[in-house]
Amino acid sequence: MRLHLIDGTFELFRAHYAPRPSRTAPDGQDVKATVGVAGSLLRLIDDPDERATHLAVAFDNPVESFRNRLFDGYKTGEGMDPALAAQFDLVEEVTKALGIVVWSMDEYEADDALATAARRWRDDVDQVRILTPDKDLGQCVTGARVVQVDRIRRRVIDEDGVRERNGVAPASIPDWLALVGDTADGIPGVPGFGAKTAAALLSHYGTVDAIPADPSTWAVRVRGAARLADALNTMRDEASLYRRLAVLVEDVPLAESLADLRWKGGERAAVEAVSTRLGGLDVVPTRWR
């Protein structure tokens, strides 16, 4: 049995900006993203290669979380297309109508819910499949038991895949992001550190804190070591904060049991109601409760 954990926020953005025709509901609302997410989820369930029987979708609603209290520069919903922002409540309603468990995050982020579920149930299933290409979820990957699935590139990323992609083990992903930065989340990183340099140091030392202050003692050779060491030593406190921002929470209070995540089919009346509201769905459930 596989457990599929879907980054609903990523799916909503992907559907909104996909090169597909626009969709407008009878009331005039732009619903392209919502209809796209609904179709994507139902196609996942019907995909014979995925064999999705137990699944949940996590959304950032709102985008802000506890991390915004830790760092003013952390990502917000500012600048988001209003047509996209207006669909967060709607897509959750539609996903629930399809009979799929929804985790609507407020204090935490969607990624925290996915990380919590992966850790909680990884020993109870054959494989946990986290559906998002976001690099920060790489820290949850465990061997071939917990993997990321990049549906855009049709790629499954196991522990070896994380090392190939980022140059470090999953446990070092937060430290790698602290050094390199993550523009999507508003983490600036430490000036001068690129992906390869950060990977070279972290593949040996594991964490930012373990990197010696004196570059002459570094066990790995990197270009501009003195300059990099100076930047890091000046920003040790900031790097520690950036790492904290990148570490995913693994104890979010999710109410459901694993059995609750089993898909039993769509709620016919609810699906018909949202379909009417949206002006139709591209795909409808193949099974009903």
Image (cartoon, grey):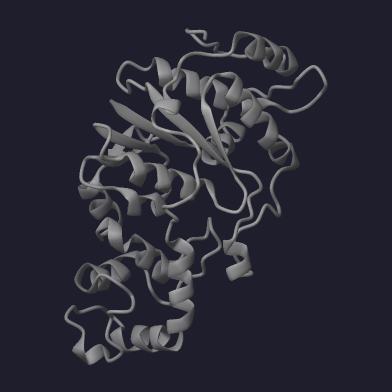
Visible in this render: residue 151? no
x 36%, y 68%: residue: 175
When asked about the image quadrant of residue 107, the answer is: bottom right
Quadrant in which the N terminus appears: top left
x 45%, y 68%: residue: 244
x 48%, y 45%: residue: 113
Q: Give the side of residue 198 with respect to residue 152, left or right.
A: left
x 53%, y 55%: residue: 184
When asked about the image quadrant of residue 193, the answer is: bottom left
Q: Give the side of residue 272 with respect to residue 58, left or right.
A: right
In this rendering, is residue 246 above or below 96? below
Q: Give the side of residue 220 with respect to residue 281, left or right.
A: left
Visible in this render: residue 13? yes
| Percent of width and height locating residue 151 | 39, 32
Query: Is 33 or 52 nearer to us in this picture?
Result: 52
In this rendering, is residue 268 above or below 166? above
| Percent of width and height locating residue 72 | 64, 69
| Residue found at the very far right of the displayed protein | 27
In this rendering, is residue 197 above or below 182? below
Q: Give the side of residue 235 with respect to residue 176, left or right.
A: right
| Percent of width and height locating residue 198 | 32, 70
